[in-house]
Image (cartoon, rainbow, N blue to C red):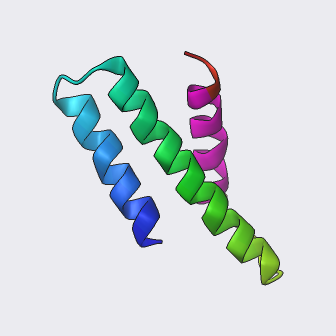
Amino acid sequence: MLDIDDARKTCHTMREVPHSRAALKAAEQRLVTALEAYAAAVAARGLPLPHRLRVELIVYRSVVAHP
């Protein structure tokens, strides 16, 4: 979960301060990777992924997939 928090903070910072588009995309990809790892760990335990995290994962997958 700490990876997700760190990745969210990085994305937030990248949006507020001018950075290259590539750097923002890399931060968003890092967030997707962290969310997917968390989702896999939750699924391995047979638990449902919280709705907020499921929606966040869907949104960021879409953002990363479309330049």
Q: Residue at x 64, y 25 (%)?
A: 65
Residue 44: x, y in percent? 80, 78
Q: On the image, which quarter does residue 63 sit in?
A: top right
Q: Residue at x 27, y 30 (%)?
A: 15
Residue 23: x, y in percent? 34, 29
Label count reads: 0
Question: Is 16 placed left or right of 35 in the picture?
Answer: left
Residue 21: x, y in percent? 35, 19
Q: Residue at x 29, y 41 (%)?
A: 12
Quarter occupied by the C terminus: top right
Q: Which span of residues is magenta-colored?
A: 52-64
Question: Is 66 placed left or right of 45 in the picture?
Answer: left
Note whether 8 is above or below 66 in the view shown.
Answer: below
Q: Residue furthest top?
A: 67
Q: Residue furthest bottom?
A: 45
Residue 34: x, y in percent? 54, 58
Tell me the chief SS of the magenta region. helix
Question: Is 16 placed left or right of 22 in the picture?
Answer: left
Q: Residue at x 34, y 59 (%)?
A: 6
Note whether 10 is above or below 20 in the view shown.
Answer: below
Task: Out of 47 and 39, give the one closest to the viewer.
Answer: 39
Q: On the image, which quarter does residue 59 sit in?
A: top right
Residue 12 visible in the snapshot = yes
Residue 13: say if magenta.
Answer: no
Q: Residue furthest left?
A: 17
Residue 50 visible in the snapshot = no
Note whether 45 is above or below 23 in the view shown.
Answer: below
Q: Residue furthest right?
A: 46
